Amino acid sequence: ELYMNNNEDESVTDVILDKKKSNIKEINHKGDIIVDGNYDVLITMAKCCKPVKGDDIVGYITKNQGIKIHKANCKNVNDITDRVVNVMWNYDTKNTFLTNVYIHMNIEEDILSKIIEIATKKGIIIKSFNSINKNNEIMYELCVQTKDKETLDKAISAFRILPHVTDVTKEI
């Protein structure tokens, strides 16, 4: 006998079917972006606007880099009508996205520890930090990693209430 059935209520066929079901992996859509219903298209994220999951986006067909994904309001694609393709986020993706956040201040103050604390509590990761002094204003440029726009927006709201912060933007 090929199979010893310890439970008389289960047939060999039922056990084999249950085993097959347990081996079926969850559907994992490899792409972050769906292009006209397709997942399997070469996609690159635009470095000019760095879109994150949840942003309104548009796809631009490039010559060598597949379809480049821009925020819908990106100045680099505002006036372009040809070579634009319909794209949408794959909300099943678990990937994270890099983008920039700019914290503007009117007085130089060491708030880096507060920024890191807020980022940690709100679920974003600071990948790099740069301070820029310009026209008597201090601007902190953060490159952050986030899972989506909603998470990023919560962190931005928390950054805005820090002392001496005059504005927080996603673009310079």
Image: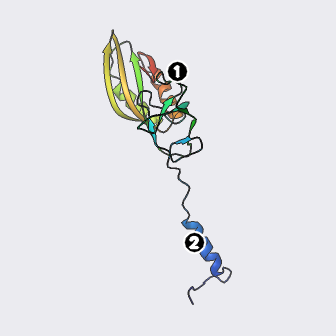
- Which image quadrant: the N terminus? bottom right
Q: Nearer the viewer, residue 149 or 30?
A: 30
In this rendering, the answer to whether 156 lies above or below 29 is above
Q: Residue at x 40, y 30 (%)?
A: 47
Residue 123: x and y, percent? 46, 37
Q: Secondary structure at mark 2?
A: helix
Residue 74: x and y, percent? 49, 24
Say which mark, if any, is on residue 79: 1
Q: Residue at x 31, y 15 (%)?
A: 133
Task: Tell me the crowding category of disc 1: few under 14, some 14 to 19, or many 20 or more residues within 10 angstroms, Cα based.
Answer: few
Residue 41: x and y, percent? 50, 44
Front label number (2 vs 1) = 1
Farthest residue to the right: give it.
9
Task: Tell me the crowding category of disc 2: few under 14, some 14 to 19, or many 20 or more residues within 10 angstroms, Cα based.
Answer: few
Residue on which the image places disc 2: 19
In this rendering, the answer to whether 120 lies above or below 8 is above
Asked which quadrant contains residue 26, the reply is bottom right
Q: Give the amino acid type for the residue marked by disc 1 in the picture.
A: Asp
Asked which quadrant contains residue 38, the reply is top right
Q: Secondary structure at mark 1?
A: loop
Q: Nearer the viewer, residue 168 or 92?
A: 92
Q: Residue at x 52, y 36 (%)?
A: 53
